[in-house]
Image: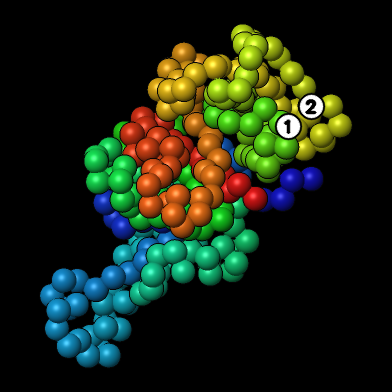
Amino acid sequence: MISQLTIIAATNYSETAANAVNYAAEIAKAVGAKLVLFNSFSLSVHSANSLISASEMQKQLDKAVSRLDVLGRATAALFHIEVSTFCSYSFLEDELISIIDITGADLIVMGMAERSFAQELLGNSTTSVIKNINFPVLAVPKNAHFHKLKKILYASDSVGWSSIKKFSWIRNIVEPLGTEIEIFNVNNSIKELKEEQSIRLTGEEELEDVKYIYKSVRSNAVIEEIKKEIKKYNADILVMMPRKYGFWDSLVHISKTRIMAAGMEIPLLSIPNY
């Protein structure tokens, strides 16, 4: 029996974040998951630039907590799901780690701002969470809307089945929805192209009910090939597994996952490379 999932949706009340909250709520409704709304409370510019008293600080925190509670009750009523809220004055990533531990969450959902040069180079709060928290994160663009998850494209640079096993937990989400997963491999070392080959992973109970299509494409333009396949396959979600780089490499390397996240029209699910 599959245990009930818990999804954390982070919000700063922007239009992009509001869309991500709705997307998370739709997933929660579709799979019977619990939704946790999280807001990392920050002081207003005026308050931050002045010597704010402890009582005034508490007032602002109470106001932030109340606002999130209102959103939580409205979301629960609209989508008919179980919703809880966490609001705190803290660093986003530190508090997310704490909430993951408290709630036993399975997934973080965050809004993804539109693409820009600064986004690609420096990232934002969502790409920072993807980079620094070893946890599955679903980045949702402002104009992405939830539809039944019929097709998931998993872009991998490894042909080994070990890369598939690393995201086997996703079955908890896709199994009730009859989702098809295409494993799309872009790898320079592949000598032979395999167009469309249906496969089944025997002996893997957690994956035995999921249909897979496996493709390999030989190309140096990895990102462009992924974008082409998204359109060709008509994918609802893209899954990627960001690599970890050393300090010196990180100075000159811009993550493909970050670039994809900043320019996506469909949600990007980033899963940790354990």
The residue under label 2 is 201
Q: Secondary structure at mark 1?
A: loop
Counting from the top left corner in percent of width and height, residue 227 is at 42, 23
Residue 103: quadrant of the picture: bottom right
Residue at far right of view = 203
Residue 128: x %, y % from top left: 40, 55
- Residue found 62% across the figure and 19% down from its top: 190
Whole-angstrom CA distance, mark 1 to mark 2, is 9 Å
Q: Quadrant of the N terminus?
A: top right
Rendered position, 169 above or below 38: above
206 sits left or right of 67 in the view = right
Number of marks drawn: 2
Q: Is residue 267 visible?
A: yes
Residue type at mark 2: give it. Leu
Badge 2: residue crowd in 10 Å (few <14, some 14–19, many ≥20) = some
Q: Position of residue 232 (x, y in %)?
A: 46, 13
> Based on the displayed image, in which of its 4 quarters is residue 201 positioned?
top right
Q: Earlier in the sequence, mark 1 or mark 2?
A: 1
| Residue 235 versus residue 253 in the image, above or below | above
In-image side of 40 versus 178 (left or right)? left
Which is in the foreground here, disc 1 or disc 2? 1
Dot label at residue 161: 1
